[in-house]
Image: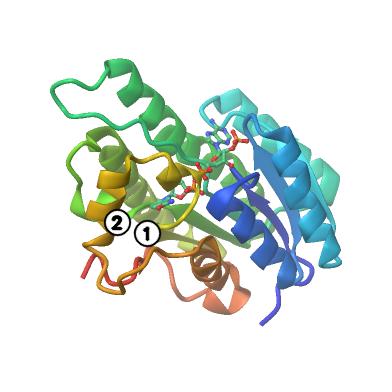
């Protein structure tokens, strides 16, 4: 299957899963807008990797926690590429801590980035997609949003919220050939999981039936599957890419 002629926007495309998604979409022929927050050099490297695959790509700085910035981001992508077919809401953070001791500001920051960021970008992109009568929106949730995890109340709440958003938006937008789906990764090797203490990483690994962490490319393939035109009858769904963790 091919994404030739499609324009994709990937939030948090500078590193980790987001970069792998950009490259997978480029490999399938889509032009890629690589959003980043603070990692400009890393975003340029993602752009380089996409262009190497023969597609157009460009980096766009925007903080997804800022609604005005999300609106401007979608406008800038539309101006540069002429349309927007695929949005992958990937930008995310984790600020972990136990319920009784975690800081309120970390809860707010996590919700602002992971849930409100997804909402702001989805709303801005849907405006364009509704006019086009076509769109594929993919949101990164997490197994933690489905199952919970001690020490991650903020992150779990944000990722469970994403699932609610996906299901409601899927129902609202289905009539215009816009699908909204979620990918729920388990334990994937990126900067996010590298930051965890070794004990926490070993404990997480012990819950993975496959017995190994996942690679960003394995998540990217699931996101690209939802992004295909031919996946148009699938909406409001959650696909776990987790080595069996959530079973
Ligand atoms: P990562 O390596 O930490 O990368 C996070 C990405 O998000 C970076 O590109 C970062 O860009 C971007 N980002 C963060 N805050 C942003 C903001 N306010 N505005 C714009 N971009 C922002 O994380 P990852 O592991 O690849 O995770 C990607 C997604 O998958 C996240 O939503 C995460 O919750 C989800 N996920 C990951 C795992 C896992 O095991 N790794 C498991 C389940 C779900 P800059 O560096 O440019 O700021």
> Which residue is most to the bottom?
1
Report x, y in % for residue 187.
36, 57
Residue 61 vertical position relative to residue 191 in the rendered view, above or below = above
Instruction: Give the quadrant of residue 44.
Output: top right
Mark 2 vs 1: CB contact within 8 A: yes
Q: Residue at x 84, y 59 (%)?
A: 51
Which SS class for mark 2?
helix
Please indicate, yes or no, whether residue 233 appears anywhere in the rendered image.
yes
Q: Residue at x 77, y 72 (%)?
A: 4
Using the image as rendered, state which of residue 91 and residue 20 is in the foreground: 20
Identify residue for label 2: 143
Which tag, 2 or 1, sits closer to the chain's start?
Answer: 2
Which SS class for mark 1?
strand
Residue 78 vertical position relative to residue 100 in the rendered view, above or below = below
Instruction: Give the quadrant of residue 214.
Output: bottom left
Q: In the displayed structure, does residue 33 sit left or right of residue 106?
A: right
| Callout count | 2
Report x, y in % for residue 14.
65, 44
Image quadrant containing the C terminus = bottom left
Using the image as rendered, state which of residue 130 and residue 49 is in the foreground: 49
Q: In the displayed structure, does residue 221 sit left or right of residue 105?
A: right
Crowding near the residue tagged with mark 2, few <14, some 14–19, many ≥20 C-alpha atoms within 10 Å: many
Using the image as rendered, state which of residue 133 and residue 25 is in the foreground: 25
- Mark 2–mark 1 distance (CA, rounded to whole Å): 5 Å
Please indicate, yes or no, whether residue 88 appears anywhere in the rendered image.
no
Instruction: Give the quadrant of residue 96.
Output: top left
Q: Is mark 2 within 8 Å of ligand 1?
A: yes
Report x, y in % for residue 133.
63, 61
Q: Is mark 1 within 8 Å of ligand 1?
A: yes
Identify residue for label 1: 184
Crowding near the residue tagged with mark 1, few <14, some 14–19, many ≥20 C-alpha atoms within 10 Å: many
């Amino acid at each position: 299957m091919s994404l030739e002629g499609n324009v994709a926007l990937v939030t948090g495309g500078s590193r980790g899963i987001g970069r792998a998604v950009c490259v997978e979409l480029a490999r399938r022929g889509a032009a890629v807008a690589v959003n980043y927050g603070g990692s400009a050099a890393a975003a340029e490297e993602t752009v380089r990797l996409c262009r190497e695959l023969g597609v157009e790509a460009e980096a766009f700085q925007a903080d997804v926690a800022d609604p005005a910035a999300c609106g401007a981001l979608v406008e800038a992508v539309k101006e540069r590429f002429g349309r927007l077919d695929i949005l992958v809401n990937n930008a995310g953070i984790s600020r972990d801590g136990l319920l009784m001791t975690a800081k309120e500001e970390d809860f707010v920051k996590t919700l602002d980035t992971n849930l409100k960021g997804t909402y702001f970008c989805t709303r801005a992109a849907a405006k364009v997609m509704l006019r086009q009568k076509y769109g594929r929106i993919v949101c990164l949730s997490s197994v933690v949003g489905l199952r919970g995890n001690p020490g991650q109340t903020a992150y779990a709440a944000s990722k469970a919220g994403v699932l609610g958003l996906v299901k409601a938006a899927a129902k609202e937008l289905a009539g215009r050939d816009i699908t909204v789906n979620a990918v729920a990764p388990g334990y994937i090797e990126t900067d996010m999981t590298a930051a965890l203490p070794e004990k926490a990483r070993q404990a997480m690994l012990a819950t993975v039936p496959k017995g190994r962490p996942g690679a960003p490319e394995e998540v990217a393939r699931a996101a690209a599957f939802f992004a295909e035109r031919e996946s148009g009858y699938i909406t409001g769904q959650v696909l776990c890419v987790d080595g069996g963790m959530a079973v």
